[in-house]
Image: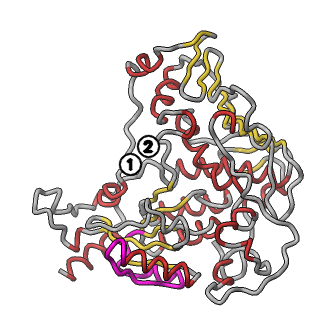
């Protein structure tokens, strides 16, 4: 059986044409329920902090087995090992350096659950090593990194999943509904066009403004269990302070971008989907915010994205948490409020769900990740549409950091006549960690 396993993995990692894929698990063929080792998919998790060890991600079963974990914090790694042994009844290999995990021949899928400044580097290296990738949001910390990650996935014929799921499952925050009825309503044209979508604390969304940085951090001694140099990786060197790492890293531009960068893709990706914008990007980004510190992320009041057809996504931040009744979607002919309360032509539409039930369903989405891996099919949120929603987030980060309106070309994926903004698209990495 060992040779069968090796042959299967070698084939998956080297086949240049997806049409050549012909291995079918014996369960699909109607065989016994037992899964042969050659039919199992094996995963490794990089980053065993809060997200990496969450119950949603830290799993292992016959079809999708946990075989390796990695962390640069020895305490996190030990907690991950103990959790795997006690709760999953598996004994994964442990790694300090992610490059060793992605070269492990037993790993088919690499789950990147690190701070965002590592997402692109690890995912690209994993794809180049022949691994499929499950990546946490935001997909990448910069637009340029997103371009290169998308290219690496395609070049290596890998399957990529971005981990924000609201376009295809779960009630969407305060709206009291999944996204599908919103998609059907928008596609019907009954609300008119163009549409404005407002994402605000007033209609159920929270930007987590406590995810901000501290200015003038005092250097501290690096704890013995943490390899801080490896934790920084491609990020610029800054003296260690505990507030830069682990749960509070989100407050620093070098690693993330506060609540906007860390929560933005959850909120914006479903909007991109139901507006039908998976293949384009906004052309103008306007900000209303205090001047940002060059190191520590601050708060903001409003960010407005405008598409070339006049559609807008409006992010309302600090000061808008309880601004009364605000429509989530607003068009010339109708509005949708929190709790899926709908007005058409200025009048309540209490029978709206019955009307929506009669509308055509959107195109089906491929949401079974294991099936996608085995059949070599694109996952519902992948390197293409995920790159576009990540770009929207990163457009906002660039405008916020520069505190001015930016214009963007969605074809060349660059800012128009703004050299300083374009330098934020392609940010330098520390020597030896080029993405």
26 vs 146, left or right, is left
Q: Is residue 92 magenta?
A: yes
Nearer mark to the viewer, of 1 and 2:
2
Q: Is residue 32 magenta?
A: no
Q: Nearer the viewer, residue 76 or 402?
A: 76
**Distance between the alpha carbons at the discs numbered 1 and 2:** 9 Å
Give the residues in magenta: 86-109
Q: Position of residue 15 (x, y in %)?
A: 34, 68
324 vs 110, left or right, is right
Q: Nearer the viewer, residue 201 or 360?
A: 201
| Residue at figure coordinates x 86%, y 56% from the top left | 292
For disc 1, the marked residue is 367
| Residue at figure coordinates x 58%, y 82% from the top left | 72
Check disc 1 and report its element: helix, strand or loop. loop
Q: Position of residue 43 (x, y in %)?
A: 38, 71
For disc 2, the marked residue is 169
């Amino acid at each position: 059986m060992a040779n069968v396993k090796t042959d299967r993995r070698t084939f998956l990692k080297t086949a240049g044409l997806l049409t050549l894929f012909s291995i079918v698990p014996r369960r699909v063929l109607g065989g016994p329920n037992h899964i042969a080792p050659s039919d199992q998919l094996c995963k490794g998790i990089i980053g065993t902090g809060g997200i990496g060890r969450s119950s949603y991600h830290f799993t292992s079963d016959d079809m999708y087995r946990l075989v390796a974990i990695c962390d640069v914090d020895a305490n996190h790694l030990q907690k991950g090992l103990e959790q795997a042994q006690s709760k999953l009844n598996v004994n994964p290999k442990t790694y300090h350096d992610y490059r060793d995990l992605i070269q492990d021949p037993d790993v088919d899928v690499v789950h990147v659950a690190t701070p965002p400044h590592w997402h692109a580097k690890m995912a690209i290296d994993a794809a180049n090593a022949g691994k499929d990738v499950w990546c946490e949001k935001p997909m990448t910390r910069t637009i340029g990194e997103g371009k290169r990650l998308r290219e690496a996935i395609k070049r290596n014929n890998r399957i990529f999943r971005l981990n924000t799921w609201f376009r295809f499952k779960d009630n969407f925050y305060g709206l009291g509904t999944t996204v599908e009825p919103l998609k059907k309503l928008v596609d019907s044209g009954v609300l008119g066009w163009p549409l404005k979508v407002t994402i605000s604390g007033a209609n159920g969304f929270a930007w987590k403004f406590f995810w901000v940085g501290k200015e003038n951090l005092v250097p501290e001694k690096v704890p013995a269990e943490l390899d801080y140099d490896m934790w920084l990786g491609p990020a610029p060197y800054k003296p260690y302070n505990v507030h830069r790492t682990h749960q509070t890293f989100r407050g620093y531009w070098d690693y993330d971008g506060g609540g906007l960068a860390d929560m933005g893709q959850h909120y914006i990706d479903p909007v991109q989907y139901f507006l039908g914008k998976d293949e384009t990007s906004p052309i103008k980004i306007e900000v209303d915010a205090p001047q940002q510190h060059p190191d520590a992320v601050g708060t903001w009041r409003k960010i407005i994205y405008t598409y070339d057809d006049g559609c807008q996504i409006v992010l309302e931040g600090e000061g808008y948490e309880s601004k009364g009744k605000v429509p989530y979607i607003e068009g010339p002919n109708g509005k949708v409020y929190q709790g899926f309360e709908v007005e058409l032509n200025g009048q309540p539409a209490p029978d709206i769900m019955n009307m929506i039930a009669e509308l055509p369903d959107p195109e089906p989405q491929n949401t079974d990740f294991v099936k996608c891996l085995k059949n070599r099919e694109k996952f519902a949120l992948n390197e293409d549409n995920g790159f576009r929603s990540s770009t929207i987030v990163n457009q906002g980060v660039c405008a916020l950091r520069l505190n001015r309106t930016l214009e963007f070309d969605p074809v060349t994926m660059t800012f128009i006549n703004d050299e300083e903004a374009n330098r934020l698209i392609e940010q330098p990495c520390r020597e030896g960690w080029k993405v």
